[in-house]
Each structure stands twice: as structure tokens, then as C-alpha cells.
Image (cartoon, rainbow, N blue to C red):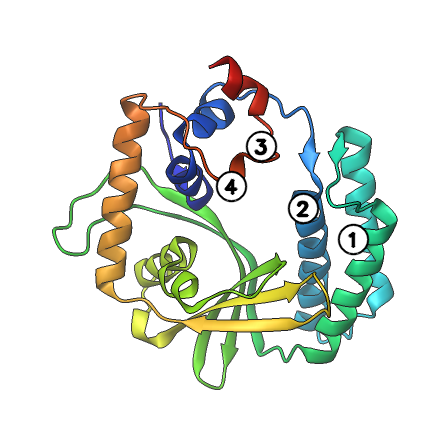
Amino acid sequence: MLDHISYTQINTYLSCPLKYNFQYIERIPWPFKPEALIFGSAIHQSLEHYYTGRKESRNVPINEMLALYDASWEKETSENEIRFKNGNTRDSLLKTAESMLETFLKTVKPGEILAIEQSFSEEIIDPETNENLGVPLKGRIDLIERTKSGIAVIDHKTAAKSYDDERVANDLQLTAYSYVMSRQGHDPEDITLRFDVLMKNGKCAFQTYQTFRTPKDHARLFKTAKSVIQGIKAEAFYPQKSWMCNGCVFERECEKW
């Protein structure tokens, strides 16, 4: 029984339906967690702490952010095996995190903070036909700010390379956020969608990418979600070979399949 769907579920199915099956249907435990996932989550918690402090009109020093980062690593390593790549270690990644967070603090210019980790649950309705999928879209928005140009809906990312225009223009996660805001009474044209990206390779940098969505994008999101839900209900689970297979937590199960 599919009682809801998230952007992550949709994206997982689009990337590899068999992985979706292993993760969400069979719920196979992960034998390890990739370092990139743990690193990104730890940075995310540090940024959440920063914005919580700013919402309370408090300056947040880097030592507090690093303490959150380290606590996240401690929790994960006590519960999971962590698989490192490219010669990285916990200590080397801590140094990278410190450089990234220092860059963030020097560069960030927050607006009025309206919401942090805002949960949502919205029906998925075709804006052109009013067809309702009957399966709500659930998730959380990292940050919502009021800026000089209006409302900004922001997702935090860590990345090894810069984003290109096509990715930003077509990213389904930002489309989902725009759709959710429209369901909550906002005009899509009044919403700025933003990726705030901390670069982790070479010279650390904090990059911002802005874009917008229209009702046509929302209609495409509806059709994409509808197709994915139909595939899940039909148990259309098959492997999709790609660069993401390298280091996949379900590699062994995929080989057995």
C-alpha cells in the first residue's frame, strides 16, 4: 500500500526501479553507508543549526557548527559501517568541513528566516485537469526566507563540481517545492527557487543557483509522479545501469537478482 510518495522516492525510482524495490519495498538493511551521504548529512545539520541561531537573532560561531558536524559523524559511525573513497578519512573530511563552513560564514547573506526544515504533505493534483492521484507528496523544505525580491525556497547541497544551467532548470526537487508552495497559496512566479551549494573539492566555495517554475512544470511533475506510482503498483522493478552503480549499497542484491 503506497500511502504517500516523496521526491526522494520518485528520484530513486527514476534512477533505478530495482533500487527502489530494495529500499522501499523489501527494506533491505544497508551493509554500509557511503562517506558522501554521511558528510552531506553532517554539513546539513551544521547549516540547520546556523539558521536556527540566526532566526533567534544570534550569531553562530564555527565551533558550534563543527560540534554538530562531529556529533553527526559520531552517531553514524557508532551505528553503521562507513565506506570511504578516494583516500578520504574522517579526519581529512573534518578539515574539508571546517574550510567549507568557514567559507559559508564569510559568504552567506541570510534574509528574514521564515521556516527551517518545513514539513509538508500535499495532494498531487494536475493543474490542467484537476485529476488527483490520491497519494500525497510528503517531504521537508530546508529553508524558506523573505528576501528583497520576495520569498525564496532553498535547498542546501554539497557538491564536488558546479551545477550547470540545465540541471537547475529541470531539477525535479525544486519543481516539487514550487508545487507545494503553490498549493499553499503562493503564485509560482513570486517564488524564487534556490540551491545553496557548498563546494567540497579544491578551493572551497559557496555557490547560489536561482530559478523559477511555472504551472506547466507542475503539470509535468504530476505526470512524472503518476507514471512512477503506476510503475510501483505494477511492480515494474528492473535495474538501471549508470555511473551510480559504483558504490551502490545494493550491489550484492542486484547481482543476485
Identify the residue shown where x is 40% and y is 71%. Answer: 211
Kindly identify the amino acid type of the residue bearing the numbered disc 3. Cys
Q: Earlier in the sequence, mark 2 or mark 4?
A: 2
Q: Are marks 4 and 3 in contact (CB under 8 Å)?
A: no
Kindly identify the amino acid type of the residue bearing the numbered disc 2. Ala
Find the distance from the CA under tag 2 to the CA under tag 3. 12 Å
Identify the residue shown where x is 78% and y is 75%. Answer: 59
Point out the image quarter for the N terminus: top left
Q: Earlier in the sequence, mark 4 or mark 3?
A: 4
Residue 88 drawn above or below residue 44: above
Q: Which residue is mark 3?
A: 248
Find the distance from the CA under tag 1 to the CA under tag 4. 28 Å
Residue 39 drawn above or below residue 48: above
Residue 189 drawn above or below residue 231: below
Q: Earlier in the sequence, mark 1 or mark 2?
A: 2
Residue 39's spot in the image, x, y percent?
A: 71, 49
Residue 30 drawn above or below residue 161: above
Q: Residues within 10 Å of mark 1 (few under 14, many from 20)?
A: many
Which residue is at the far left?
129
Residue 193's spot in the image, x, y percent?
A: 43, 68
Kindly identify the amino acid type of the residue bearing the numbered disc 4. Trp
Find the distance from the CA under tag 1 to the CA under tag 2. 13 Å
| Left-right relation of 155 to 69 | left
Q: Earlier in the sequence, mark 2 or mark 3?
A: 2
Q: Residues within 10 Å of mark 4 (few under 14, many from 20)?
A: few
Front position in the image: 61 or 43: 43
Find the distance from the CA under tag 2 to the CA under tag 4. 15 Å
Kindly identify the amino acid type of the residue bearing the numbered disc 1. Tyr
Q: Are marks 1 and 2 in contact (CB under 8 Å)?
A: no
Q: Which mark is residue 69?
A: 1
Q: Which mark is residue 36?
A: 2
Front position in the image: 30 or 219: 30
